[in-house]
Each structure stands twice: as structure tokens, then as C-alpha cells.
Amino acid sequence: MIAALGLLIGIAAGLIFSPTVPAWLLPYLPIAVVAALDAVFGGLRALLDGIFDDRVFVVSFLSNVVVAALIVYLGDHLGVGAQLSTGVVVVLGIRIFSNAAAIRRHLFKA
């Protein structure tokens, strides 16, 4: 309940204040969103499997975002930012689809 309330407050604040993202942060935002989605789908899968732990979820969420951003940052400084960004999206995308498949199997028992 608290998480849903926090989500609604965050959405409302975003719509009311209409925040802008600094230009230097723009390359990292899509990667951070994909990393966060990976953590959310992993948390949902863990919840359905009965092994969810809120501390593990928070650490996973934050570490996914930080590590993905650091990989993209390193790639930018090495001159291969696009390749590493693509690699991060592919790896996290595979994990998201794997978790989504497990969630679907759990929900539909198929």
C-alpha cells in the first residue's frame, strides 16, 4: 500500500512540476530505466516465488542502476559508449524477458 501511494505521489509530482533532465544525464537515463525495470521484474518474480525480501530488492534496484550507469560512463570515456550501452540493454532485456516468462508461467501455471 505504501509503495502504491509513493508511486502515485511521484507521478503526480512529475506531472505538476514537470522536471527537466540535465543534458549531461540524458545518455544514462534510458539505461537507468531499463536497469530499474529489471529489478522490478526480478522483485515481482521473487514475490510470486515466495522469496521476496525488501532489503534485497532495494539493494538490487540501486545497484542495477548504478552499475549500468557506470558501464555506460566507462564506455563514453573509452569511446565505445554506444556499444556498451547496447550491450547493457541486451543483457538487461534478456533478464527482463526471462523474469516476465517466469511470472507468466507462475500466473498461468503453464
Image (tube, rainbow, N blue to C red):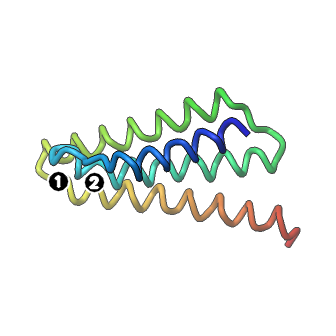
Kindly identify the residue that appears in the image at 88 percent across and 68 percent down.
Answer: 109
Residue situated in front as seen by the camera: 72 or 41: 41
Is residue 70 positioned above or below 107 on the image? Answer: above
Is 73 placed left or right of 94 in the picture?
left
Residue situated in front as seen by the camera: 53 or 83: 53
User: Crowdedness of circle 2 by 10 Å Cα count: few (<14), some, many (20+)?
Assistant: some
Kindly identify the residue that appears in the image at 57 percent across and 45 percent down.
Answer: 7
Q: Quadrant of the C terminus?
A: bottom right
Q: Which residue is mark 1?
A: 80
Find residue 72 and report its horizontal and vertical position in percent: 26, 46
Find residue 67 and report its horizontal and vertical position in percent: 38, 37
Disc 1 residue type? Val
Residue situated in front as seen by the camera: 84 or 100: 100
Residue lying farthest top? 55
Q: Residue 106 lies in what quarter of the image?
A: bottom right
Kindly identify the residue that appears in the image at 15 percent across and 48 percent down.
Answer: 23
Is residue 98 positioned above or below 61 on the image? Answer: below
Find residue 96 and report its horizontal and vertical position in percent: 56, 59
Disc 2 residue type? Leu
Kindly identify the residue that appears in the image at 50 percent across and 43 percent down.
Answer: 10
For the residues marked 1 and 2, what is the alpha-carbon distance in whole angstroms?
6 Å
Give the total number of marks visible in the rendering.
2
Mark number displayed over residue 94: none
Is 15 placed left or right of 27 in the picture?
right
Q: Residue 9 lies in what quarter of the image?
A: top right
Find residue 20 and report its horizontal and vertical position in percent: 25, 48
Q: Quadrant of the N terminus?
A: top right
Residue lying farthest right? 109
Find out whether the residues at labels 1 and 2 contact each other: C-beta distance under 8 Å.
yes
Mark number displayed over residue 84: 2
User: Crowdedness of circle 1 by 10 Å Cα count: few (<14), some, many (20+)?
Assistant: few
Mark 2 secondary-structure assignment = helix
